[in-house]
Image (cartoon, rainbow, N blue to C red):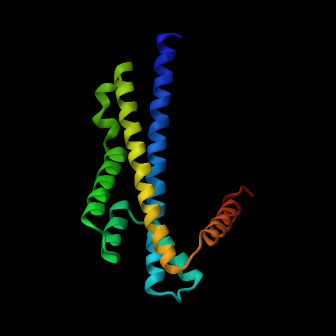
Amino acid sequence: MTETSDEESITKELHAWFGLSAYYVQCFEVELVTLHILLTRIDNRSMKKGQLDDCEDILSAETLGKLLKRLGQKASVSTEFQTLFDTYLSKRNYLMHHFFFHNSDKLGSTEGLILMTEELKELAYLFKEANSVAMEMSKNVRQRLGISEKDVEQEIAEYVEQTKNKYRPK
């Protein structure tokens, strides 16, 4: 392999890890929206599907910071979880707004690209953890509501099919 192809390969890996980190952040955000909807159902179990859909549309437009703030207003969040959520938010903002600028001095060398990739791997694992924490919280609320995992799987399958049809080229 030539030095150029080595650097191209490392650059591709760097961008792949950036993409994976962003993906896990988005999964975390989506799970927080789900958690909010579930908590809304606890407060108002008679809400109809259309009302829940409207709630989802509003929440999906919120920033991660606003979703986390709303969560703290809607549910009792322990200091430990609040600290975790603050870390997730700070790291998310760093990733999306500062990562490449902060590391711009490393872009010119193979060693720098490798260091950046390692940092992105750590961020990806952190955001994967964030999503797992939110998923566990959602699972606990679903159990409180009497929503089975089978119900969740069916709802997801219906949603995926609707989304495919909505965005399928005509």
Which residue is rendered at x = 75% and y = 58% of the image? 170
Report the side of 65 relative to 55 (left or right).
Answer: left
Q: Is residue 5 visible?
A: yes
**Numbered label tally:** 0
Residue 89 screen position, x and y as percent: 32, 55
Report the side of 168 relative to 93 (left or right).
Answer: right
Which residue is rendered at x = 48% and y = 41% of the image? 19
Residue 159 screen position, x and y as percent: 64, 66
The correct choice, above or below, for 97 with respect to 82 in the image is above
Q: Is residue 109 visible?
A: no
The correct choice, above or below, for 30 with respect to 127 in the image is below
Q: Nearer the viewer, residue 149 or 14?
A: 149
Residue 152 position by quadrant: bottom right
Which residue is rendered at x = 50% and y = 36% of the image? 16
Q: Nearer the viewer, residue 50 or 123?
A: 123
Q: Nearer the viewer, residue 166 or 46?
A: 46
Residue 61 position by quadrant: bottom left
Q: In this view, which residue lies farthest toward the right?
A: 170
Q: In this view, which residue lies farthest toward the bottom?
A: 46
Residue 62 screen position, x and y as percent: 40, 66
Which residue is rendered at x = 44% and y = 31% of the image? 14
Report the side of 85 relative to 142 (left or right).
Answer: left
Residue 87 screen position, x and y as percent: 29, 53
